[in-house]
Image: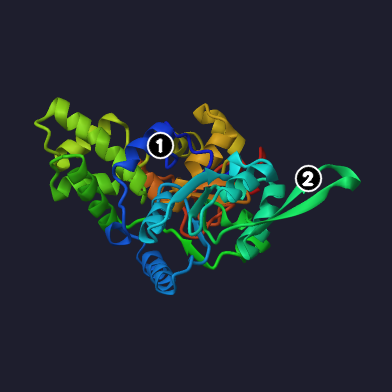
């Protein structure tokens, strides 16, 4: 299980969406590349690929989209189909456990159709090997029978475009990665881009919002449009019940305070991890299992759900001796870091640390 895959879908600032939320998101998805906000480099490159394919009257190269969840990989796959005026078939790696499952999907594709394969890194190995030939030669070999008497029947496929999406491009074997003609890596969004996302979604949801309100939501959205749209819907609810329905900076901040999302996008779990690290362990170093016990969570939950964002925000660091808090973490929680005497053990450049016994013996070493 990866840090992205394990993020609970019911977490307000989690980037994973369940089926119900994906249905809500469908109404907010842009339909064309010109409507898609952010990812400027990927959009420009993808636009050239699609325009050239339309000029040739042929299916474009296969496309691989990689990056954390919630950044628009599914949306871009649908945009690709729309730009090509082609139908789209949607499935996922975990749903394809046997080569026969993939063969059934491939054999039913029509010419020019787009096949979107989400979480492609989680596809079974037999299906993966079948996909090699399908992508390169538009052909699959269907095995009939078992044992020495088994025979392979070649099945020709119409030209199609595979759009694969993955949160873990490094888990894809090189033979599969090499068969994609275009690879786009999705980056986290800047606050200004998320403001545009919030304004666009607010218009579609018929929510009146001013620039300061949109900026407040964008700043707490962890660089992810999916989270921005989710927070917008919760702020909308608060504004309708507690105010006149208009979202400004004050209303947005109050609403998100109710939902325990602070000004940097940290939620209860994130703050509990930092609070334990600072108050109980003086900023560390402390081992993962000890830290998890202190916050009442499983070690995997702390490592895979809370830590990635805390590390990205520069609030927590992983070291061979355990987890340590940065000066920014002390500042964010409004605490004063204890000063380590000069020449103290375990000094990290630029890092004020707890002066006392080391606390990494319980598994602080990096995996």
Which color scheme is applied?
rainbow
Disc 1 secondary structure class: helix
Q: Quadrant of the N terminus?
A: top right
Would residue 78 be visible to someone looking at this image?
yes
Mark nearer the viewer, 2 or 1: 2
Q: Which residue is mark 2?
A: 144
Residue visible at 65% across and 55% down in the picture: 131
In terms of image quadrants, where is residue 138?
Answer: bottom right
Q: Nearer the viewer, residue 366 or 130?
A: 130
Q: Nearer the viewer, residue 230 or 297?
A: 230
Residue visible at 43% across and 54% down in the picture: 77
Residue 9 is labelled as: none
Residue visible at 67% across and 60% down in the picture: 133
Residue 271 is labelled as: 1
Residue 355 pos. (x, y %): 53, 45
Q: Nearer the viewer, residue 166 or 55?
A: 55
Q: Is residue 72 above or below residue 23?
A: below
Disc 2 secondary structure class: strand
Residue at the extreme left: 244
Residue 13 pos. (x, y %): 38, 39
In terms of image quadrants, where is residue 217?
Answer: top left
Left or right: where 124 falls relative to 70: right
Residue 83 pos. (x, y %): 36, 60
Reading the chain from its start, which is encountered first: label 2 or label 1? Answer: 2
Q: Nearer the viewer, residue 34 or 366?
A: 34
Few, some or many C-alpha atoms within 10 Å of disc 2 (few <14, some 14-19, many ≥20)? few
In terms of image quadrants, where is residue 255?
Answer: top left
Label 2 with label 1: CB-CB less than 8 Å? no
Would residue 364 be visible to someone looking at this image?
no
Separation of residues labelled 2 and 1 (CA atoms): 57 Å
């Amino acid at each position: 299980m990866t840090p992205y895959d394990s993020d609970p879908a019911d977490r307000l600032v989690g980037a994973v969406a369940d089926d119900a939320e994906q249905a809500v998101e469908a109404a907010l998805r842009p339909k064309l590349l010109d409507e898609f906000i952010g990812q400027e480099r990927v959009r420009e490159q993808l636009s050239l690929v699609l325009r050239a394919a339309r000029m040739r009257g042929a299916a474009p190269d296969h496309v691989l989209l990689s990056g954390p969840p919630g950044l628009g990989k599914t949306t871009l796959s649908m945009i690709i189909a729309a730009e090509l005026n082609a139908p789209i078939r949607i499935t996922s790696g975990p749903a394809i456990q046997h080569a026969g499952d993939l063969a059934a999907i491939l054999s039913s594709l029509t010419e020019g159709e787009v096949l979107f394969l989400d979480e492609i890194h989680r596809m079974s190995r037999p299906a993966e090997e079948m996909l090699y030939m399908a992508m390169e030669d538009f052909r699959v070999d269907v095995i009939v029978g078992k044992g020495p008497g088994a025979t392979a029947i070649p099945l020709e496929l119409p030209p199609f475009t595979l759009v694969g999406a993955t949160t873990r491009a490094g888990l894809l074997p090189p033979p599969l990665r090499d068969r994609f003609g275009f690879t786009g890596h999705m980056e986290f969004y800047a606050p200004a881009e998320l403001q545009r996302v919030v304004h666009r979604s607010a218009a579609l949801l018929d929510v009146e919002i001013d620039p300061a309100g949109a900026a407040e939501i964008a700043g707490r959205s962890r660089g992810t449009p999916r989270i921005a749209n989710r927070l917008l819907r919760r702020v909308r609810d608060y504004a309708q019940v507690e105010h006149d329905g208009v979202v400004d900076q004050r209303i947005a901040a109050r609403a998100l305070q109710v939902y325990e999302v602070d000004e940097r996008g940290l939620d209860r779990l994130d703050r509990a991890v930092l609070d334990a690290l600072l108050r109980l362990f003086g900023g560390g170093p402390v081992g993962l299992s000890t830290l998890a016990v202190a916050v009442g969570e499983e070690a995997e939950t702390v490592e895979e759900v809370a830590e990635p964002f805390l590390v990205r925000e520069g609030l927590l660091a992983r070291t061979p001796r355990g987890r340590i808090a940065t000066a920014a973490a002390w500042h964010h929680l409004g605490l004063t870091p204890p000063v380590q005497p000069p020449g103290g053990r375990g000094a990290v450049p630029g890092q004020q640390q707890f002066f006392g016994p080391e606390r990494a013996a319980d598994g602080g070493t990096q995996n």
